[in-house]
Image (spheres, rainbow, N blue to C red):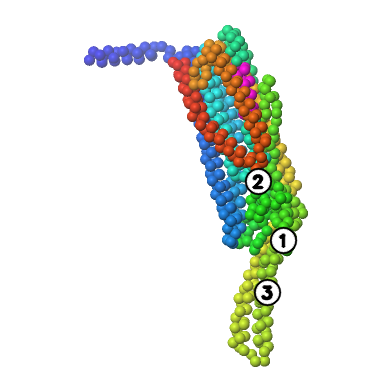
Amino acid sequence: MKKMILLVSMLAGVMTFSGCVDDKESASVTAVREAKAAQLSALAALSNAQAANQQALADTENALREAKVAYETAKAAYQQALADKANSDAQAAAAMAQQQMAAAQNEIQRLANELEQMAIRHKIAMLDLQTKYETALKNADDESQALLGGLYTAYQTAATNLLDAQQEIARQKIGLAKLQAGLVDSEEAKQLMINKENRKIASAEQTIAEWKAKLEVFEAQKAPEEAKAELVTEKAALSQLAQDKAKALEAADKASEEMNDARSDIYDQKYRGLARDVTGVKYGNFIDEEGNPTGEAFGDFIYLQGCEENALGKPVEATVNTYWFKTTDDKGNTTYTAVMNRMIQKTVTKTETTAPGVESTNTYEAYPTYYYQLNAEGVKAYIAAIKANVEKNEGKALEDAQKALAAQQKVVADLEKAEIKDEVAIEEAKSMLPGLQTNVNTAQAALDKANAQVAAIQAAFDTMAAEAANWTATVEAYNAASEAYCDAQFVCEKAKDAYGLQNAKVYALEAVVRGNVIVDGGVNMTFDQAIESAEQQIANAIDTISDAKQEIANIEIAEDDQLKALAIERLEAGIAIAEAEIPALEKIVADTKAALDAATAAQAE
């Protein structure tokens, strides 16, 4: 009982005492508490953004997997249809499969576009979150700023390395899908491999520049107070470069959106739709009122062929991007005639100095669009050929049906004129007339339908000719937008490199102020160890450059017919290696995050 009374008395005393004082915390305590809350909020936002981006990458990979399956399924159906020549529906099936293959190709290309835009927007978000964290850190004392700033930099670097690796894997998988889906020819496959090696060189050169900047600070052995004063100036410079980087990222994002809009304008053009119609299912076969193939086709209708996708054999004169048809005369001579060319936007490559004493080659690829361009003489020859084809088949069928009807009508007339009429024979002869008339009507309907189809193809080409100027202007606008996007990407890369170089200086100066260097996983390192590590990192980067240059030399001498297979082999190997490295990168992120969380929690106590 005494214990209970004592406890009640103590609580009463506390309550009485609490009511007698000012319960407001001091301004300094409030500032510290709010600073810690801001730090924790910024860290949580960064972690959430990382998770969201990883989910977006996973969604992209799933969509890519589905697009690849759709392409392979359509390709198998197409090849089966070509092989099944005896099947009257084979032509319709082949044309439909071609359309499905094209749709899958477009989806793969769209995913490539989306991946690049996703990467830019994530970098914008990361830069914004970094700024918020640094702002939240300003209210902390100098020692806390140095410690938490270093740990945050280690965490952010690890998280960025992981994200870059994941995005590079996604980029390589899309490149592989494009190769496997026939979106890349041999020359492009060669450029694809060279571009990848050039990216390695550019990255390694930037790595060398950043480690040399750190090495210079580590070797100077400045006093902490001197380093602290210099850190103020270098951080101000870093802040300005962060703004420049943010502006460059925003400009790249805007350029990407404008390029996408220009690409959408191409898809909206009548010309493009008609180009696909005349090379695909719509005008290659009869269609119903809803535009679906009925399974019927002209007797031996002359299809426009893409030279890599045909059952007739590749003509020597045809280029890889030509739609053509062939005709064979009575003597067996075959003529190939180009009706429409399909050109693709080129790759844009620039070389500029991205850091002091560092020359890097960065290559950015404008997303290709098919630029269909008519060959007027080829169109004229094609229309003449399909008209002749209709006359030869449907026209001849009607003529034969009419002759058969006329012959039977003559038989009936002759029987009726005979002096001695054979009524049984007359009735029997007459009984055949309705069937023969039906044959005529059917043949006439087939001819009308075929002529209507020819007229529709003629109208399509006529409309394309009328729309040609507008189409060309739209494609040129897209080409300009895609090159502007490449330019914006390069400016963005330069801004990122400049920021990275300055950030390396700040990182090293923060280490001097702290008295140690924080490396992967939040591990502390002495300056002698840091100098040795920096020298090793530089040596590794030099080896990477040497290997990449040798790889480019090997690619340059590879035979054209080996390039696609070589590109696929290299991409598959690269993806396997990169995926095997992901767990180690994830562990570094987890370790650096844990170290930062622990330090933040300790500061808050």
User: Magenta region's main secondary structure?
Assistant: helix
Q: Which mark is residue 402?
A: 3
Numbered-mark total: 3
Judge depth for marks 2 and 1 and give the one in front: 1
The residue singled out by tag 2 in the image is 267
Q: Residue at x 67, y 41 (%)?
A: 560
Q: At label 1, which amino acid type do we have?
A: Gly
The percent position of residue 471, horizontal first and vertical second, equals 72, 46
Query: Few, some or many C-alpha atoms within 10 Å of disc 3 (few <14, some 14-19, many ≥20)?
Result: some
**Residue nearest the viewer, comparing 77 with 193:** 193
Query: Few, some or many C-alpha atoms within 10 Å of disc 1 (few <14, some 14-19, many ≥20)?
Result: few
Q: CA distance from mark 2 to mark 1?
A: 41 Å
User: Magenta segment range?
Assistant: 200-214
Is 89 above or below relative to 435? Answer: above
The percent position of residue 100, horizontal first and vertical second, equals 59, 50
Left or right: where 133 falls relative to 279: left
